[in-house]
Amino acid sequence: MAQIVIKNVKKQFGDFTAVRESSFTIEDGEFFMLLGPSGCGKTTTLRMIAGLELPTSGEIFLDGEEISQRPPSQRDIAFVFQMFALYPHMNVRKNISYPLVSQGMPRAKVREKVAEVAKILGIEDILDRPVGGLSGGDRQRVALGRAIVREPKAFMMDEPLGALDAEFREHMAEELRALHDRMGATTVYVTHDQLEAMQMGDKIVVMNNAVVEQFGTPQEIYDKPATMFVADFIGSPSMNFLNFHGKVGSGSADVAMHQNTFAIPQTREPFEGDMAFGVRPEHITLSDDAPFRAEIIATEYLGTTQIVTLKTAGGEAKARISAKHPAKTGDTVGLQFNPNTITLFDRQTGRALKSELNEGVLHG
Amino acid sequence: MAEVTLNNVSKAYGKTQAVADISMTIEDGAFVVLLGPTGAGKTTTLRLISGLEKLDSGSIHIGGRDVGDDTPAQRDVAMVFQQYSLYPHLTVRDNLAFPLRSPILKTPEDVIAQKVQTIAETLQIPHKLDNKATELSGGEMQRVSIGRALVRDPQIYLMDEPLSSLDAKLRADLRVELKRIHADLGATLLYVTHDQVEAMTMATHIGVLENGRLVQYGTPREVYEDPASIYVASRLGSPRINILPAALFPGNHKGDQIGLRPENIQQGDGIEATIIRSEHLGDQTRLHLDLQGHAITTLTDPHQDYADNTTIKISPRDPLYFDATGGRVA
């Protein structure tokens, strides 16, 4: 198994820059997510690691060896596409054996390997079935089996669960993660689904417009977003941005916004201009006597919690509060924010201002 | 708008009983969501009301009138499908005006212009009115196709998973928008989905379908807090409710199976469970536990860190009880 280091990797297709100077490290055994909207460069990054595309510049190290210009066959990486890609005329056993047979492995050894993989995936009873009649889940397990059986140094997966309906997707995501925990193989996984990334990943790289916006553990990225893009892309509902014009010094522990003063994590840089006050929905509480007022414009019941949409002086915001708390459309309420969780952003650039909260995470 | 009642409605396709003996009342001004997995009979029920399918038995009344023999047009219902189907050669304005220009409705042009404008504003697409339908994004196209239903003033709006082809952000926006439209227009809506969030957040009433049968009908809160069976309890709530043998926990039990929503598992006291894995989702952390061979999912504080394979003690809070066949007993 393997560590993968991406160093200043760049990819251009003619005039179009697909990936701009990206660097990050995937540790041995990690389940690593490349997350972003379509067209952000995440699939191109994955394909460069696998060798399906060659970087325009930069280096890629697999276990310390520079491999960026090598063909895929010399990289010992298995690529799992949309998992339905199986050989339709072969049965399950032949599908899984195929990579080994084509390497010229002796038949007895192949049988042994396939049996082992089938056991890991729990598909021993369908080995002699044609792939045509299999359920969606079994087809995916077979496709995975074909990747696992080679024992590659790392797995690359490109939105493998993208085509499934929500309920089944959640189930397969759990199964995939459990499989990873059993095998401990380094896995790089591309998705545009933030929940999938948070749920399965040890680490996440968030990409946008060919640039790596942030890199870290799911909780770190959620709590300490480096940019407004990340704050907006992660979380459902996403982070609220209350707009205001104001100023903070270096070392301020509060900020004035719309005639009120709010406590914030101590700032580490001064700023003056158009800002966004970033607060997650679960860190807003409704309180009758708080001076910062808002009108309730919608409520959405979710069982234990409810989402309340509010009209404030800084724009629309959503709060996640207990379903037991009364909230009626049309009512005016006061808002309080959990001060330790606030991130201020420079609205122009979208960059988070440095503070006590995020100083360990932000770089540059 | 009108009240719609279904009395013992059934429909079979060959040997498959798609809808079995459904009775329910969609009150005037209600937003009713039919919830169930693929094949539960949701879409068939909708098509029976619209007149696109014929009843095998039972009756349907719209505004007090039996519509069993009426054509879809005579029933005066407006339908929105999952796949938006706009006229590609027409502008957004003409797409929206199309139903009003139907020979049955005979709407004067100045009334049409005014209605189209109002609906476009409600759906926040007035600046797109002169675009060709093909020049819109997916979300805009679906809004136009919803708008094409809304320009009419039918007895009831019937919507078949109208948001399922949209991305998550847009879906969340349109959920709020649909709810607002419902409140503003006082419209009667029957909405079909397999998405529990849509059902919970928009509905005034949820009807849960299982194999063609209506197994529970009530407000979202009633269905969530007081489910009639394991099947219903498992349809709402994410992560899903944990169903376990009651005997795993000490004490007297009112049923063989215990149902515990993830948030109703107390940590600190009780019996030992092993932590298999924690998932940090930002606003919450999910713990996957093993309790004597049974998998349990529970929630914990986002910043609580537990190492895998350590143990914690858990006990039930506000448990639901079910009998051996899954029916609710307490």
Image (cartoon, rainbow, N blue to C red):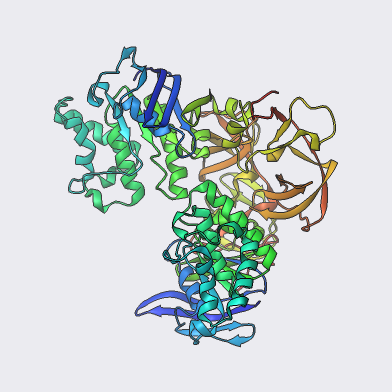
Q: B152 or B255: which is nearer to us?
A: B255
Residue A223 percent coordinates (x, y): 65, 56
- Identified at 45% across, 19% down, the residue is B24
Residue A299 percent coordinates (x, y): 53, 33
User: Would residue B61 appear left or right of B33 to someone viewing this image?
Assistant: left
Above or below for B217 versus B174: above
Q: A141 or A43: which is nearer to us?
A: A141
Would residue B276 be visible to someone looking at this image? yes
User: Would residue A289 appear left or right of B110 to someone viewing this image?
Assistant: right
Residue B86 percent coordinates (x, y): 25, 44
User: Would residue B114 appear left or right of B37 to someone viewing this image?
Assistant: left
* Residue at the outermost top position: B64
Would residue A34 be visible to someone looking at this image? no
Above or below for B209 versus A79: above
Q: Quadrant of residue B21?
A: top left
- Identified at 51% across, 69% down, the residue is A94
Above or below for B168 versus A130: above
Above or below for B1 versus A206: above
Work out which quarter of the rendered image holds the C terminus of chain B and state it.
top right
- Identified at 53% across, 56% down, the residue is A138
Work out which quarter of the rendered image holds the N terminus of chain B and state it.
top left
Q: A118 or B257: which is nearer to us?
A: A118
Residue B73 percent coordinates (x, y): 23, 25
Q: How many marks?
A: 0
